[in-house]
């Protein structure tokens, strides 16, 4: 009977610890949202890092229904590449999260996530 009571107590402790851990992970996820940046403020130290940009679509081109090239405009513009099939159009306001990179001397963002605003 004592072993059964001890097992029941350990089970309660494990469940409570798991719930507390999940709650902490949820809070951490909410607190790590990327700040929205201005295109003009991106610099060499941002290369290879994840960035979040907001702007207006100046030009959009799709190829093979999988690759989309977007020119995102604020006060200046930047090229965005997406490998997802997305439904957006010129002059739409969007928020983009992705990796800031340089390819053939051109700076661009490879999008992980694009949302209409």
Image (cartoon, grey):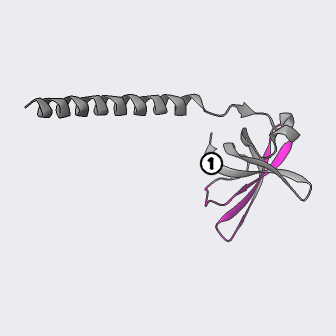
Residue 86 in magenta stretch? yes
Q: Position of residue 41 (x, y in %)?
A: 84, 33
Residue 43 in sight in this render:
no
| Residue 14, quarter of picture | top left
Residue 101 in sight in this render:
yes
Q: Residue at x 61, y 56 (%)?
A: 87
Q: Residue furthest right?
A: 105
Q: Which residue is mark 1?
A: 113
Badge 1: how crowded within 10 Å, few (<14), some, or many (20+)?
A: some
Residue range corresponding to the magenta coloring: 61-87
Q: Residue furthest left?
A: 1
Q: Quadrant of the C terminus?
A: top right
Q: Residue at x 14, y 29 (%)?
A: 5
Indicate whether 115 appears above or below 13: below
Q: Position of residue 48 (x, y in %)?
A: 78, 47
57 or 106: nearer the viewer: 106
| Residue 55, quarter of picture | top right
Answer with left or right where residue 93 lies relative to residue 11.
Answer: right
Residue 10 in magenta stretch? no
Answer with left or right where residue 49 lies relative to residue 86.
Answer: right
Callout 1 secondary element: strand
Indicate whether 89 appears above or below 96: below
């Amino acid at each position: 009977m004592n072993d059964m009571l001890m097992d029941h107590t350990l089970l309660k402790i494990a469940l409570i610890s798991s719930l507390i851990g999940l709650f902490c992970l949820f809070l951490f996820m909410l607190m790590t949202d990327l700040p929205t940046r201005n295109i003009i403020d991106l610099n060499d130290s941002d290369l290879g890092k994840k960035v979040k940009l907001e702007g207006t679509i100046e030009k959009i081109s799709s190829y093979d229904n999988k690759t989309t090239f977007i020119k995102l405009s604020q006060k200046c513009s930047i090229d965005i590449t997406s490998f997802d099939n997305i439904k957006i159009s010129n002059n739409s306001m969007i928020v983009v999260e992705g990796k800031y990179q340089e390819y053939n001397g051109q700076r661009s963002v490879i999008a992980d996530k694009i949302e209409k605003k």
